[in-house]
Amino acid sequence: MNEEIQRSLKLFIVMSRAHKAISEQANQFFQANGVNPTEFAVMELLYHKGKQPLQKIGGKILLASGSITYVIDKLEKRGYITRVNCPTDRRVTYAEISEEGKEFMARIFPEHEKHLHDLTDALSPEEKDTAIELMKKLGLSIKDLSY
């Protein structure tokens, strides 16, 4: 196998393993706080960006739109979010974080940030900047490829 192809394969494996290690740790944190990663992602979006149309949430957190309704239903039953009808377009419904949801996120989000910082602390600030730059470059280059 050609050396450049071998290097690309190794990059994929290393990125996958790093992602798996970080995701497993983050998922344990979410589970310990009574939510799953998707529920946390929806809550984090609403907490930081404000109310969102239900139809747009899936694209923003990389989740299939059919699953969003299920997640929204679960979070609404727990009192973390509410549905709000759009006053100008009956076809649009927004998800909005509730006061209880804001309190929950205000409590756990700082812990989540610290946890992620601890998980990535093996890299210097400069190395983190370089990794961010390289991952962005890679991700943006892939959208132009088609198979």
Image (spheres, grey):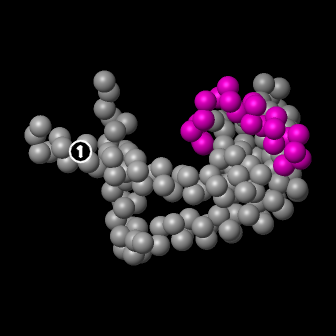
Query: Which quadrant does the C terminus fall into?
Result: top left
Residue name at image x 36 percent, y 70 percent: 127
144 vs 120: above or below: above
Residue name at image x 84 percent, y 62 percent: 103
Taking depth in this image into account, of 110 and 98 the one nearest to the observer is 110
Is residue 42 in sight in this rendering?
A: no
Is residue 143 in sight in this rendering?
A: yes
Measured as percent of width and height from the top left, residue 51 is found at 76, 46
Measured as percent of width and height from the top left, residue 97 is found at 81, 50
Residue beneath label 1, please?
8
Name the side, left or right, on which 107 lies relative to 146. right
Amino acid beneath label 1: Ser
Query: Which quadrant does the N terminus fall into?
Result: top left
Measured as percent of width and height from the top left, residue 106 is found at 77, 65
96 vs 132: above or below: above
Name the side, left or right, on which 119 lies relative to 87. left
137 vs 65: above or below: below
Image quadrant assignment for residue 141: top left
Residue name at image x 36 percent, y 74 percent: 126
Is residue 121 magenta-colored? no
Secondary structure, mark 1, is: helix
Image quadrant assignment for residue 2: top left
* Mark 1 crowdedness (10 Å alpha carbons): few <14, some 14-19, many ≥20: few
Residue name at image x 32 percent, y 27 percent: 146
Q: Main secondary structure of the magenta part?
A: helix
Is residue 72 magenta-colored? yes
What is the magenta range? 59-80
Name the side, left or right, on which 90 lies relative to 55. right
